[in-house]
Image (cartoon, helix red, strand yellow):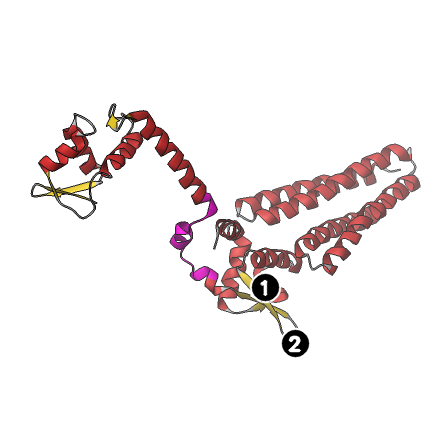
Amino acid sequence: MNDNDAIKLFKCLADKSRLQILKSLSKEDMYVERLSERLDLTPATVSFHLKKLTEAGAVKSYRTQYYTMYSLCSDVFETRIIDILKEETEDSALLNERDEIYRKKVIESFFEYGKLKSIPAQRKKERIILEEIAKSFEKGKEYTEREVNIIIADFHDDFCTIRRDMISEKIMDRENGKYWLL
Amino acid sequence: MTDIKINQTKEFFENNIKKIKNEMITLKTDNRNDEAVFKRIEMNVYEIFFTVFNAALKVSENDETKLKTFFLKKAEEIPSNWEASLKKAIEHNEADKAAIENIKLDAIKQIKENFNEIW
């Protein structure tokens, strides 16, 4: 389900009458007049809501001998909201692109010839700087504190602050004097 | 032309506009926004024909026949487009448009019935 489909569905569900229609359909398939009597709404109003629900993919219809029956699209309601949120979309790609531009700008501002000019006061910017320094460490390899200090010192003299901040930002972890990338 | 009939008609419009407005607020509060929009549409029809009635009062110059002719003519003319739209909406299976046209036509039916009863 893409963003537009999700928005359409959530907007459609934000209506008491439509929720009541869905509740009725969750019990059994029904036709317009039956829903109309059950919910005390005019058939025209029920048809209006059913059209919206059909367009949002919440309901489907099929013809029987006498009536057009409506049924719930169960698969839509079995979708977990977290799965919708995790879905990669064009919007998120755009956000990633913006993030990358911002990141590049911060790195260019704070690094000069491979050296860190100053430690950013803003946490968001410092995080970017720390991640950049972290690229000098190998994933899966354990380092002593001295090795960590030497690597960081190539970037900035205040290696203690940077080392501690890498731990607090959960870029690195340490135990028994050993450091490694997370 | 009796003032009683004029007042009765005015009261009919005023009371219905007030009643529909209250229903609209209730529906909004009850998270039935689309149905609240339907009420707004219904209220608009009452407001339009209240204006038509006031115009009829002016142009009729105290002539009851003139007033009735003017009002009923408008009550036929204006909804003719709604009927055409309803027909099209049904043909194209557009339940949303059909619902709106039905609301407007139901409202004018009530207005005409009440007008004929009073006059």
Q: Is residue A17 magenta?
A: no
Tell me the chain of label 1. A
Tell me how far mark 1 sits from mark 2, CA to CA.
Answer: 18 Å
Pointer 1 residue: A35
Front residue of B113/B81: it is B81
Instruction: State the image coordinates of residue B88 (x, y, percent, origin top left).
Output: 76, 56
In this view, the residue farthest toward the top is: A117
- What secondary structure is marked by label 1? helix
Relative to A70, is B100 above or below? above
Q: How many dots with numbers?
A: 2
What residue sits 21% from the left and 46% below the top? A139
Q: Amino acid at mark 2?
A: Gln
Q: Give the magenta range.
A: A76-91
- Residue B91 position, x and y percent, is 74, 60
Question: Do dots 1 and 2 share one subunit?
Answer: yes
Q: Relative to the observer, which residue lies in front, B82 or B38? A: B82
The label shown at residue A65 is 2
Observer-side mark, 1 or 2, equals: 2
Q: Quadrant of residue A80?
A: bottom left
Seen at 16% across and 46% down, the residue is: A141
Residue at far front of view: A113
- Identify the residue at the far bottom of this view: A65
